[in-house]
Image (cartoon, grey):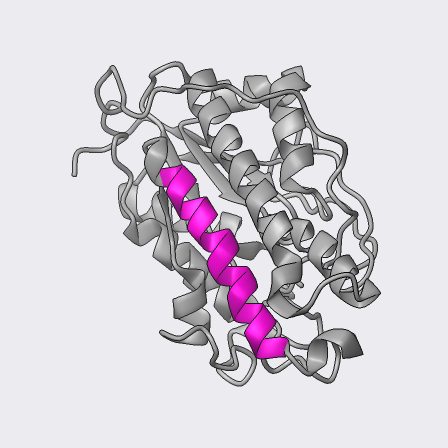
């Protein structure tokens, strides 16, 4: 169970959308199709540091967002989402124009995103021209674990371990491919991570999950988040800890009761949650685009 809950949803555009990654509807509680057939192996190496200096003062930046419904703005009644709020913070804090292209699509798995980055020329061109690349992916990957748990082919949190392992390989290849396309140019690479969206949603999630909601929610988030942050660090980027910010240090607090998750449009951050995510991203800084 991740953030991919609606069974069908259109691509939400933040600004200047030129092409969307392939997505689909969801099944079970995990909200997206099981991962697609394996994509060709991703790049094996990528520059993790810049070879040129920061952008000239006052120059505009291009921000590209990639991912699933974690990134389209789902759960925010305004439809803006953390990508738009993050861009607003950059504009206000740096006095620069920021052009946003949101390529996220509901239901996209990490396997599908990797395939798009490897083979879709429009996506590749957008990334190659981006100063800032942000990722919010993984919620749709949870579906495979949900299906296994519902089928009774495994027990509890172990059902999600294969999905976490596959995601870890994909997200590392995604980060490597992004940095390879950037070809050593100054790049801000950032990723959000998952909250625990199951605790507090026991009345609306499927019965096979409700009795072990907190155990599964924390396990999912910790596993996927460790993979995301590891890939970001390995390729010169950074991540934010959404689990702790929304669910507390142990990851088990009720984010709905805290007013940060949207139970009516389950299970996503609400406007306040999206704004918090944007603030956490902005706090990571903008090196190497600007001197720290």
Percent coordinates x, y for residue 233 in the rendering? 33, 39
Number of numbered discs: 0
Q: Is residue 193 visible?
A: no
Percent coordinates x, y for residue 27 in the rendering? 83, 57
Measuring 27% from the left and 45% from the top, which residue is drawn there? 285
Is 216 magenta? The answer is yes
Q: Quadrant of residue 55?
A: top left
Measuring 63% from the left and 54% from the top, which residue is drawn there? 139
In the image, residue 42 above or below residue 33: above
Relative placement, left or right, of 97 versus 159 is left
Q: Which residues are magenta?
A: 213-232
In the image, residue 99 above or below residue 168: above
Percent coordinates x, y for residue 42 in the rendering? 56, 22
Q: Quadrant of residue 59?
A: top left
Is 57 magenta? The answer is no
Measuring 72% from the left and 48% from the top, which residue is drawn there? 106
In the picture, the quarter occupied by the N terminus is bottom right
In the picture, the quarter occupied by the C terminus is top left
Relative placement, left or right, of 32 versus 201 is right
Q: Is residue 158 visible?
A: yes
């Amino acid at each position: 169970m991740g953030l991919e809950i609606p069974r069908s949803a259109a691509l939400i555009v933040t600004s200047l959308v030129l092409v969307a990654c392939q997505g689909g509807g969801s099944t079970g509680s995990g909200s997206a199709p099981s991962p697609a057939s394996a994509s060709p192996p991703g790049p094996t190496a990528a520059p993790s540091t810049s070879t040129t200096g920061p952008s000239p003062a006052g120059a505009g930046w291009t921000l590209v967002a990639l991912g699933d419904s974690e990134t389209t703005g789902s759960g925010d009644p305004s439809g803006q989402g953390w990508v738009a709020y993050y861009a607003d913070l950059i504009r206000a804090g740096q006095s620069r124009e920021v052009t946003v292209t949101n390529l996220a699509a509901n239901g996209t798995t990490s396997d599908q995103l990797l395939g798009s980055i490897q083979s879709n020329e429009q996506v590749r061109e957008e990334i190659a021209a981006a100063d800032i690349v942000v990722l919010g992916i993984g919620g749709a990957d949870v579906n495979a674990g949900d299906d296994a748990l519902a089928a009774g082919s495994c027990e509890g949190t172990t059902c999600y371990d294969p999905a976490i392992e596959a995601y870890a390989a994909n997200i590392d290849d995604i980060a490597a491919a992004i940095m390879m396309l950037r070809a050593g140019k100054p790049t801000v690479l950032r990723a959000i991570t998952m909250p625990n969206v199951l605790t507090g949603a026991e009345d609306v999630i499927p019965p096979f999950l409700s009795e072990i909601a907190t155990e599964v929610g924390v396990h999912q988030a910790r596993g996927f988040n460790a993979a995301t942050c590891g890939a970001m660090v390995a390729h010169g980027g950074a991540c934010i800890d959404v689990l702790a910010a929304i669910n507390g240090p142990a990851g088990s607090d009720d984010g709905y009761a805290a007013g940060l998750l949207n139970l009516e449009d389950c299970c996503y951050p609400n406007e306040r949650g999206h704004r918090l995510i944007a603030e956490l991203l902005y706090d990571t800084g903008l090196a190497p685009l600007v001197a720290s």
